Amino acid sequence: MGPVRRVNERIPRRDHDAVRPGHTDNGHSVASMPHGATGPDLRDFNPVAGYRNEARRTFRGLEDPILSHRYDCAVPEATHTTAANFDAAEYAEMLACAHALADLAAPLTLQYFRSAMHVENKAAGRDFDPVTAADRAAEEAMRREINIRFPDHGVIGEEFADVDGDGPFRWVIDPIDGTRAFIMGWPMWGMLIGLLREGSPYLGLMDQPFTRERFWCSQDAAHYRYADGTTGVLRTRACERLEDAVLSTTHPDLFDAGEQADGFYRIKREVRMTRFGGDCYAYAMLAAGHCDLVVEAGLKPHDIAALVPIIERAGGIVTTWDGKAASNGGNIVAAGDARVHAQAVALLSR
């Protein structure tokens, strides 16, 4: 096999507060870019295809020290859904809006992160479902921008009432997925921006404003942009056997006692390693080929809708525990390889 190609493109960075939807001097839309990208490098960006010079990484064995593992990490030959049959110009417009929403909301979350903040509890009794001013400010800003650009689009969010809309498109947004991590000062949270078309996943974007990482999907691929400006194509890794898999879930308390907990622990006993605490970041790492399974329970549409097309177009698969579509939430299993997904579903649905 030939040498592994690397991504070495760099994009000049600016502070979040300087990034707003608009246009550069050469007429390119900042809204279509990941936050912080400016200047002539915009000529290399296409909101549908990504960056002109980005390389597709190949992950096999130990040839890529970043994404390799001590067992085979070849790119799986799994099929994945695309939006390739839809109009390219329309998709470009929607993806540009998703980037703009993330750029707009990012500084609103960062001004609260790792600072003294008031935390409300939305849950009753002894349960804890936190919400902060950062959640509400970011979601309000995104809703306003969506209404300006696409007044006929519907919106599903976490903090405010749903808007039905008149057309086929419905945005599904979560301003801070991982609010518990957010209020603890941990960077394992992110902003989720998804778009459904006729109820099916159309595009998705996950942004981590603090680490300045972004993950999104074009019509038939998934992409990343890291803090240093490096960009590339996301690919899941192969994992044929459950005993070789690395598993992640946000917390074992997600699973109700009985069938849910029993199903999760059946998988946990079989895998090589389990890591807790990922929230949406775990799904991004699955799409990037760093882990093999994410298993969770009781998710809402805003928790998962944006992540489904990113993972699928990176080569992975996301379903409910019984193998059905995942965009409406519920009990979710995501895998980088269809073979280990099938093994996980068999244990979860037993």
Image (spheres, rainbow, N blue to C red):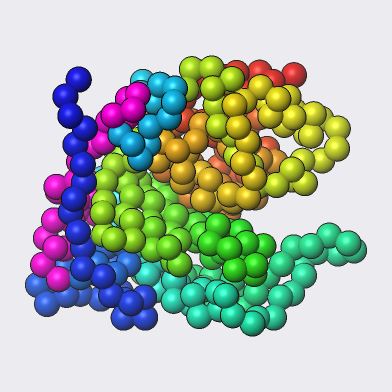
Asked if 214 appears above or below 276 in the picture, the reply is below
Asked if 50 appears above or below 257 in the picture, the reply is below
- Is 150 covered by the magenta stretch? no
Q: Nearer the viewer, residue 162 or 232?
A: 232
The N terminus appears in which quarter of the rendering? top left
How many labels sit on residues?
A: 0
Asked if 148 appears above or below 255 in the picture, the reply is below
The C terminus appears in which quarter of the rendering? top right
Residue 163 left/right relative to 87: right
The residue shown at (41%, 53%) is 205
Q: What stretch of residues is rendered in magenta? A: 39-63
Residue 200 left/right relative to 89: right
Question: Where residue 197 appears, x then y in whole percent?
Answer: 44, 46
The residue shown at (23%, 50%) is 50
Question: Where residue 277 appears, x then y in whole percent?
Answer: 63, 50
Residue 125 left/right relative to 148: right
The residue shown at (53%, 62%) is 187
Q: Nearer the viewer, residue 75 or 206?
A: 75
- Is 54 covered by the magenta stretch? yes
Question: Where residue 223 appears, x then y in whole percent?
Answer: 32, 46
Q: Answer whether residue 126 is visible to the viewer in this image.
A: yes
Q: Nearer the viewer, residue 156 or 330?
A: 330
Q: Nearer the viewer, residue 148 or 62?
A: 62
Question: Magenta span: helix, strand or loop, mainly?
Answer: loop
Q: Answer whether residue 170 is visible to the viewer in this image.
A: no
The residue shown at (39%, 63%) is 212
Question: Where residue 69 appears, x then y in whole percent?
Answer: 43, 30
| Quadrant in the rendering for residue 95 | bottom left
